[in-house]
Image: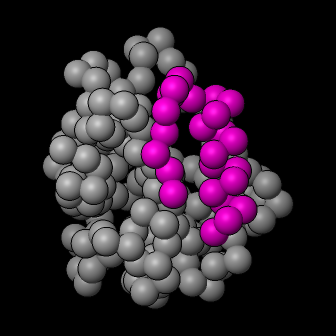
């Protein structure tokens, strides 16, 4: 089975590590999320429901054109309550270290964090392909499409520098 055969990350009930062990070592400390003057990341949770829903639901066609989502069943129409269920699942996966989902926020964060908008998402999950440690996907809303490449480059560098993966399938 390859990652192309897997259900979409957002619809998967349980991540399934391809190596039979934990996704990240027990002693691994999740590194601080990257940021720059255009965007910053923070763990996705139920507090982002309204803004997350607005971001992806306004950008479904753009997300489906983003590498990693071309053949994806997600995004698809759903209610805000269903979206909340997905966010709760991702937060639980993060807490249990089964997968790591981040919301992408506009601006530099810091003192202006409360005014920043949700502009995308990043998913770091185990791969079922035994030759790949992690399956990573990201998207930004259509109104911030110019950040697709920059986000991918920043995330790839972060994965290379701070995460314990030998091989990653991203984009």
The vertical placement of 18 against 103, above or below, is above
Q: Residue at x 25, y 72 (%)?
A: 73
Note whether residue 111 is visible: no
The answer to whether residue 167 is above or below residue 156 is: above
Percent position of residue 149, x then y: 67, 65
Residue 47 lies in what quarter of the image? bottom left
Q: Residue at x 63, y 79 (%)?
A: 145
3 to the left or right of 105: left
As for residue 154 lying within the magenta part, the answer is: yes
Span highlighted in magenta in the image: 148-171
**Residue 86 in picture, x, y percent from top left:** 28, 60
Of the pair 168 and 59, the residue shown nearer to us: 168
What residue is shown at x 49% (from left), y 72% (from top)?
66
Residue 82 in view of the camera:
yes
Query: Going by the image, does 116 lie left or right of 15?
Result: right
Q: Give the answer, above or below, for where 164 lies relative to 89.
A: above
User: What is the chief secondary structure element of the magenta stretch?
Assistant: helix
> In the picture, residue 120 is in which quadrant?
bottom right
In depth, the one of 21 and 67 nearer the eye is: 67
Query: Could you say which is closer to the camera, residue 46 or residue 28?
Result: 28
């Amino acid at each position: 089975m390859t990652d192309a055969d897997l259900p979409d990350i957002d619809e998967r009930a349980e991540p399934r590590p391809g190596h039979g062990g934990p996704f990240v070592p027990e002693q691994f400390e999740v590194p601080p999320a990257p940021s720059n003057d255009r965007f910053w990341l923070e763990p996705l949770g139920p507090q982002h429901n309204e803004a997350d829903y607005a971001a992806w639901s306004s950008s479904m066609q753009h997300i489906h054109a983003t590498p990693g989502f071309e053949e994806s069943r997600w995004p698809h129409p759903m209610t805000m309550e269903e979206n909340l269920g997905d966010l709760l699942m991702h937060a639980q996966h993060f807490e249990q270290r089964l997968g790591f989902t981040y919301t992408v926020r506009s601006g530099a964060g810091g003192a202006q964090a409360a005014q920043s908008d949700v502009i995308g998402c990043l998913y770091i999950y185990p791969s079922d392909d035994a030759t790949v440690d992690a399956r990573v996907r990201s998207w930004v809303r259509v109104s911030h499409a110019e950040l697709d490449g920059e986000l991918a480059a920043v995330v790839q560098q972060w994965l290379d520098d701070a995460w314990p993966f030998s091989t990653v399938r991203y984009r």
